[in-house]
Image (tube, rainbow, N blue to C red):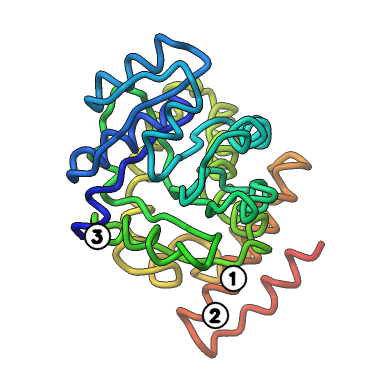
């Protein structure tokens, strides 16, 4: 990967994602040209972590970088592109890290002689201290200019990361899938701990008590896959227990429980082919 290791990468935005990725790239021998940020202090801190520069002028960052990664909130990516396109960026690869926006946000980039891509890390960054250890396990989903797609993908592959290439028209569906397995899981855990709380257990204690169960479930999924990890009343086709749950839950909880239990029943058919769970599915329609 000699060619890629000589690539200089600059960041616009010095938040959690930008700093963590910059530190990760640098650990793999890739040169970081530097950072530009709304906060000069943030740019300086990121530059110190990555042994790079803190830029005050956008044209200087552009001139010093072969790839420019816009690591800002989604709402300002378009505005940054409008500013960036004013300068000579011929031959540059311009990327953003948004999960929901596609490379089309870089409108007219071909006319500038540049290449646009979206590169989304399937990972929740927790801090801007340069801790990159867990980034090594992250998958990256990429779409954009066909002329540079392989080069961008190889950059991450050669660092050991798994990558996926999707069509730009699938970004909204892709992002929804990520939200369902991350943010919406948090909502579900909140509902579950609140229900436990109505048994007389405080919220903090409820979550602490449930964490081993939550963690073990994730471990089982990783080890056995989704159908193979199933446990509980839906997996056992235990209609009586599920009926008792539905009777005691509040209206909104009951709706969520029914919808998710229906999906568990469908997964259970994969684990137990030939089992008749039609009675359970009928119960969940009510």
Place of residue 47 in the rendered image (x, y in percent of width and height, measured from the top left): 30, 21
Residue 153 position by quadrant = bottom left
Left or right: residue 170 versus residue 62 is right
At x 37%, y 62%, the residue is 151
At x 46%, y 48%, the residue is 92
Q: Name the residue under label 2.
A: 269
Which is closer to the viewer, label 2 or label 3? Answer: 3
Q: Mark 1 points at which residue?
A: 265
Q: Is mark 2 on a helix, strand or loop?
A: helix
Q: Mark 3 points at which residue?
A: 158
Q: How crowded is mark 3: few (under 14 residues within 10 Å), some or many (20 or more)?
A: few
At x 28%, y 27%, the residue is 130
For marks 2 and 3 on the same chain, the one whose residue lies earlier in the sequence: 3
Label 2 with label 3: CB-CB less than 8 Å: no
Place of residue 197 in the rendered image (x, y in percent of width and height, measured from the top left): 55, 27
Rounded to the nearest whole Å, what is the CA distance between mark 1 and mark 2?
6 Å
Between 74 and 258, the residue placed more toward the observer is 74
Q: Which residue lies furthest to the bottom in this view?
A: 274
Which quadrant, please, contains the N terminus? bottom left
Between 150 and 195, the residue placed more toward the observer is 150
Label 1 with label 2: CB-CB less than 8 Å: yes
Label 3 with label 1: CB-CB less than 8 Å: no
Rounded to the nearest whole Å, what is the CA distance between mark 2 and mark 3?
40 Å
Residue 206 position by quadrant = top left
48 lies above or below 272: above
Left or right: residue 259 versus residue 5 is right
229 lies above or below 171: below
Place of residue 60 in the rendered image (x, y in percent of width and height, measured from the top left): 43, 26
Which is closer to the viewer, label 3 or label 1? Answer: 3
Q: Is mark 1 on a helix, strand or loop?
A: helix
């Amino acid at each position: 990967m000699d060619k890629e290791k000589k690539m200089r990468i600059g960041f616009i935005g010095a938040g959690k994602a930008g700093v963590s990725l910059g530190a990760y790239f640098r650990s793999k021998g890739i040169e970081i040209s530097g950072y530009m940020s709304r906060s000069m202090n943030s740019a300086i801190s990121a530059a110190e972590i990555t042994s790079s520069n803190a830029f005050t002028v956008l044209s200087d960052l552009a001139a010093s970088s072969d790839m420019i990664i816009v690591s800002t909130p989604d709402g300002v990516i378009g505005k940054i592109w409008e500013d960036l396109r004013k300068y000579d960026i011929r031959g540059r690869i311009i990327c953003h890290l948004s999960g929901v926006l596609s490379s089309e946000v870089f409108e007219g980039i071909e006319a500038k002689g540049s290449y646009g891509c979206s590169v989304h890390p399937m990972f929740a960054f927790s801090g801007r201290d340069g801790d990159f250890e867990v980034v090594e396990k992250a998958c990256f989903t990429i779409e954009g200019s066909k002329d540079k797609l392989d080069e961008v993908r190889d950059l991450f592959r050669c660092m050991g990361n798994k990558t996926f290439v999707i069509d730009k028209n699938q970004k909204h569906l892709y992002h929804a899938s990520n939200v369902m397995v991350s943010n919406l899981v948090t909502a579900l855990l909140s509902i579950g701990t609140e229900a436990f709380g109505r048994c007389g257990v405080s919220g903090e204690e409820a979550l602490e008590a449930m964490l081993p169960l939550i963690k073990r479930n994730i471990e089982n999924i990783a080890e056995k896959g989704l159908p193979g990890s199933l446990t509980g009343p839906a997996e056992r086709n235990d209609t009586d227990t599920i009926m008792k749950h539905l009777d005691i839950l509040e209206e909104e909880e009951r709706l969520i429980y029914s919808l998710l239990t229906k999906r568990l029943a469908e997964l259970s058919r994969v684990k137990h082919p030939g089992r008749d769970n039609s009675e359970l599915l009928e119960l969940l329609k009510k």
